[in-house]
Image (cartoon, rainbow, N blue to C red):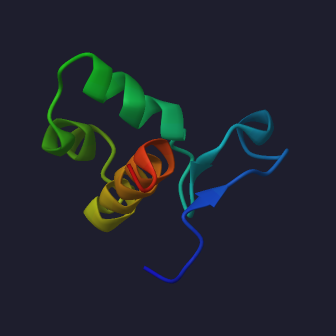
């Protein structure tokens, strides 16, 4: 995915990080996963987020947390 993944705009939800092209905060995905929901459950609840966006966000987060370990 080459386009911007996350937007932070003070005019959208006060600058809360959201998936680009949506008003869905990134933290909502994390909250769903923490609650034990499947990725598909999140995507069903927030159809404006593409599966590719959610997967790329999780891959980036994993890479940043795990690094070269």
Which residue is located at x 47 percent, y 42 percent? 65
Which residue is located at x 44 percent, y 31 percent? 28
Which residue is located at x 36 percent, y 50 percent? 58
The image quarter in which residue 38 lies: top left
The image quarter in which residue 34 lies: top left
Which residue occupies the extreme bottom position in the image? 2
Quadrant of the snapshot with the N terminus:
bottom left
Which residue occupies the extreme front position in the image? 69
The image quarter in which residue 54 lies: bottom left
Percent of width and height locating residue 24: 50, 43
Which residue occupies the extreme top position in the image? 35
Q: Is residue 10 above or below residue 5?
A: above
Front one among 21 and 2: 2
Percent of width and height locating residue 56: 38, 62
Percent of width and height locating residue 10: 85, 44
> From the viewer's perspective, is 8 left or right of 10?
left
> From the viewer's perspective, is 47 left or right of 40?
right
> From the viewer's perspective, is 25 left or right of 37?
right
Front one among 37 and 56: 56
Percent of width and height locating residue 39: 20, 42
Front one among 1 and 48: 1
Which residue is located at x 56 percent, y 63 percent? 21
User: How many numbered discs sit on the rendered protein?
Assistant: 0
> From the viewer's perspective, is 55 left or right of 26?
left
């Amino acid at each position: 995915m080459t386009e911007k993944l996350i937007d932070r705009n003070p005019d959208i939800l006060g600058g809360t990080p959201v998936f680009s092209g949506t008003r869905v905060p990134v933290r909502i995905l994390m909250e769903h996963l923490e609650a034990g929901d499947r990725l598909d459950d999140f995507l069903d609840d927030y159809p404006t987020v593409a599966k590719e966006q959610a997967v790329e966000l999780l891959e980036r987060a994993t890479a940043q947390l795990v690094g070269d370990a």
